[in-house]
């Protein structure tokens, strides 16, 4: 038994993970992962490896959690607090790969909570203090087709009487969705016709959405960038350094375009209280935003690997935030 909100969150997690493949984050395994912490094991829906590592540091991994609540319902402190507790326990785990070898940290972990609705102010404050990343995606113009397809899913599609009584095995559903988003067929035949159609619509929306990456503003503030659906070819053509301008998209999100002209290249949303702490602490200034992009186009096997790119923002965007 599952709730419709668990299913929507699962779909959002898998859509984000699929989009971020071209941004250098590679899902680990075919389904949820069980990770050892110092105090016990932790079940996470999406675990990703970074395709581009950092010399002299333990390999990094990112846990992705996503919430797709009813519009108007904010993500509260309890969600972020649980993420922080999980992150601390994962970071405290020490591995003994060989008898007689001193214990070491097997991986460095990061934890990102995505949401289509805003976070509460106290959740964003706690996230900043505990090194949990909170990323809004509900107002990112190029990602909204995915959000709309997920929000259209209702408990009645599964022939359930309430939001809390949906007959679905989340582990099996996640494996089906991950395979479908990788183009490996449709495994939704066991579900009612309406549910099967809704699930296929989510997979289709994810396939039609531009690839995504996580940009770091001044090397610290994470921002979920989604490319324009018309720009997969441009993805590989983005130069290693590009001056960009950022403008509002009219619905609370932002669009990034080449400062020299042309159509927007990326869209993004912002958890503004969370972002404000980076600005007020002096962690974000005039330095470039840096990101990882696949050398190949969308859907390719990335034969050319990945490359680092930098975006130089024209003055004015930070001031427009009023932070």
Image: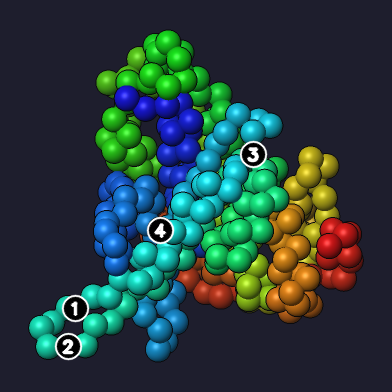
Could you say whether the residue bearing mark 3 is in a helix, strand or loop?
A: loop
Mark found first going from the N terminus, 4 or 2: 4
Could you say whether the residue bearing mark 4 is in a helix, strand or loop?
A: helix
Residue 185 percent across, percent down from the top left: 31, 35
Q: Residue at x 35, y 43 (%)?
A: 178
- Spatial CA span between label 4 and label 3: 21 Å
Up/down of 45 relative to 128, above or below: above
Up/down of 211 relative to 177, above or below: below
Dividing the picture into quadrants, the one containing residue 100 is bottom left
- Spatial CA span between label 3 and label 2: 47 Å
Q: Residue at x 65, y 46 (%)?
A: 119
**Front-most of 44 and 90?**
90
Give the mark count.
Answer: 4
Mark found first going from the N terminus, 1 or 4: 4
Could you say whether the residue bearing mark 1 is in a helix, strand or loop?
A: loop
Relative placement, left or right, of 155 versus 321 is left
Dividing the picture into quadrants, the one containing residue 180 is top left
Find residue 86 and name its label: 4
Neighbour class for label 1 at 10 Å: few (<14), some, many (≥20)? few
Q: Residue at x 32, y 34 (%)?
A: 170
- Spatial CA span between label 4 and label 2: 26 Å
According to the picture, the residue beneath numbered tag 1 turns out to be 96
Residue 197 percent across, percent down from the top left: 44, 21
Do residues under tags 3 and 1 come within 8 Å of each other at their CB atoms? no
Q: Residue at x 42, y 27 (%)?
A: 3
Mark found first going from the N terminus, 3 or 1: 3
According to the picture, the residue beneath numbered tag 3 turns out to be 74
**Front-most of 186 and 17?**
17
Do residues under tags 1 and 4 come within 8 Å of each other at their CB atoms? no
């Amino acid at each position: 038994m599952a709730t419709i909100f668990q299913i929507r969150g699962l779909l959002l997690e898998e859509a984000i993970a699929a989009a971020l493949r071209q941004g250098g984050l590679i899902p680990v395994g075919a389904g949820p992962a069980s990770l050892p912490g110092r105090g016990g094991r932790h079940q996470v829906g999406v675990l990703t490896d970074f395709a581009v590592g950092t010399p002299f540091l333990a390999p990094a991994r990112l846990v992705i959690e996503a919430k797709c609540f009813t519009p108007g319902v904010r993500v509260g402190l309890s969600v972020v607090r649980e993420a922080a507790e999980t992150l601390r326990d994962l970071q405290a785990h020490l591995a003994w790969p060989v008898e007689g070898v001193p214990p070491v940290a097997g991986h460095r972990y990061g934890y990102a909570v995505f949401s289509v609705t805003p976070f509460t102010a106290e959740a964003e404050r706690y996230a900043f203090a505990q090194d949990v990343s909170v990323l809004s995606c509900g107002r990112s113009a190029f990602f909204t087709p995915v959000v709309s397809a997920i929000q259209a899913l209702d408990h009645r599609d599964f022939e359930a009487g309430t939001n809390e009584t949906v007959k679905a095995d989340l582990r099996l559903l996640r494996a089906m969705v991950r395979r479908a988003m990788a183009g490996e067929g449709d495994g939704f035949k066991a579900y009612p016709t309406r549910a099967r159609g809704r699930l296929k619509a989510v997979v289709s929306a994810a396939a039609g959405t531009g690839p995504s990456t996580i940009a770091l503003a001044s090397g610290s503030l994470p921002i979920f960038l989604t490319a324009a659906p018309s720009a997969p070819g441009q993805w590989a053509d983005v130069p290693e350094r590009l001056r960009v301008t950022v403008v509002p998209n009219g619905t609370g999100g932002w669009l990034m375009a080449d400062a020299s002209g042309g159509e927007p290249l990326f869209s993004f949303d912002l958890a503004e209280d969370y972002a404000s702490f980076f600005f007020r602490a002096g962690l974000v200034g005039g330095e470039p935003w840096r990101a990882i992009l696949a050398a190949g186009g969308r859907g390719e096997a990335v034969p050319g690997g990945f490359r680092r790119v930098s975006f130089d923002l024209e003055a004015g965007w930070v001031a427009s935030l009023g932070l």
